[in-house]
Image (tube, helix red, strand yellow):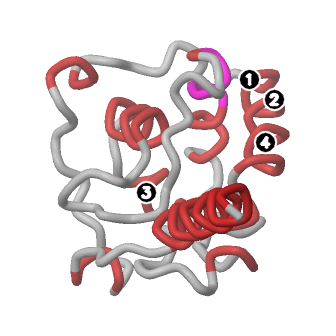
C-alpha cells in the first residue's frame, strides 16, 4: 500500500515539474514578440562571437539548431515551431534577435535560458548541454536567419 502511494506521489511530482516547464507568465513585450535586448550580466557583457561569419561554424550551428531549437523557434526562426505553439510566452523571433541583439546577448540567452525575470519563459538553459563552441555556432547561425 505504501509503495503505491509512493509511486503515485512520484508520478504527480514529475507531472507537476513537466507542466511547470511548459508554461510561464512572460512579460507583455515577449508575448507580443517585441523583446528588448537588454545588456546581459557582467559575466557575458564583453563576449564576442569568435566564429561569426565562419561558414563551417554556421553549418554546424544549423545542425545544432535543427536538433535543439527548431521545434520551438521554427525552421526559419520566426518562433513558429510546432512545440512552441502552446508556450506562453511564445518563443522569440530569432530572425529579429539575430539582426538586433549583440553576440553577448544571444550567447547569454542560449546559455542561461529564459526561466529568469524578466523573461519567465520555457526556454531551457543550454549551458552544460551544449559546449561553448556549439553555442557560438548556434549564435553564428541565428545571425544568418534574417539574411
Sooner in the amino-acid sequence: mark 2 or mark 3? 2
Q: According to the image, label 4 marks what residue?
A: 62
x and y, in percent, of residue 97 in the image: 43, 57
Alpha carbons under labels 4 and 2: distance apart = 5 Å
Q: As rendered, which of 9 and 88 lies closer to the eye?
A: 9
Quarter of the image holding residue 141?
Answer: top right
SS label for mark 3? helix
Establish if 51 lies above or below 82: above
Residue at x 34%, y 48% (from the top left corner)? 101
Q: Pointer 3: residues within 10 angstroms few (<14), some, or many (20+)?
A: many
SS label for mark 2? helix
x and y, in percent, of residue 102 in the image: 33, 39
Q: Are marks 3 and 4 in contact (CB under 8 Å)?
A: no
Residue at x 62%, y 76% (from the top left corner)? 84
Residue 73 visible here: no
Sooner in the amino-acid sequence: mark 3 or mark 4? 4
Sooner in the amino-acid sequence: mark 1 or mark 4? 1
| Residue 17 shown left or right of residue 53 in the figure | left
Q: According to the image, label 3 marks what residue?
A: 97
Residue at x 84%, y 39% (from the top left corner)? 63
Alpha carbons under labels 3 and 4: distance apart = 16 Å
Q: Quadrant of the N terminus?
A: bottom right
Q: Pointer 4: residues within 10 angstroms few (<14), some, or many (20+)?
A: many
x and y, in percent, of residue 130 in the image: 65, 26
By secondary structure, the bulk of the magenta-drawn segment is best described as helix
Range covered by the magenta-colored residues:
133-137
Q: Which mark is residue 57?
A: 1
Residue at x 82%, y 33% (from the top left corner)? 59
Q: Are marks 2 and 1 in contact (CB under 8 Å)?
A: yes
Amino acid at each position: 500500500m505504501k509503495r503505491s502511494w509512493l509511486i503515485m506521489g512520484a508520478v504527480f511530482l514529475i507531472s507537476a515539474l513537466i507542466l511547470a516547464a511548459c508554461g510561464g507568465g512572460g512579460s507583455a513585450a515577449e508575448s507580443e514578440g517585441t523583446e528588448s535586448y537588454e545588456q546581459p550580466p557582467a559575466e557575458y557583457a564583453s563576449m564576442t562571437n569568435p566564429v561569426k561569419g565562419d561558414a563551417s561554424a554556421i553549418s554546424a550551428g544549423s545542425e545544432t539548431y535543427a536538433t535543439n531549437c527548431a521545434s520551438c523557434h521554427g525552421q526559419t526562426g520566426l518562433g513558429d515551431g510546432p512545440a512552441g505553439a502552446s508556450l506562453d510566452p511564445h518563443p522569440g523571433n530569432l530572425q529579429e534577435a539575430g539582426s538586433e541583439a549583440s553576440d553577448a546577448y544571444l550567447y547569454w540567452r542560449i546559455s542561461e535560458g529564459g526561466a529568469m525575470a524578466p523573461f519567465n519563459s520555457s526556454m531551457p538553459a543550454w549551458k552544460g548541454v551544449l559546449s561553448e563552441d556549439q553555442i557560438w555556432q548556434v549564435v553564428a547561425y541565428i545571425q544568418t536567419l534574417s539574411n
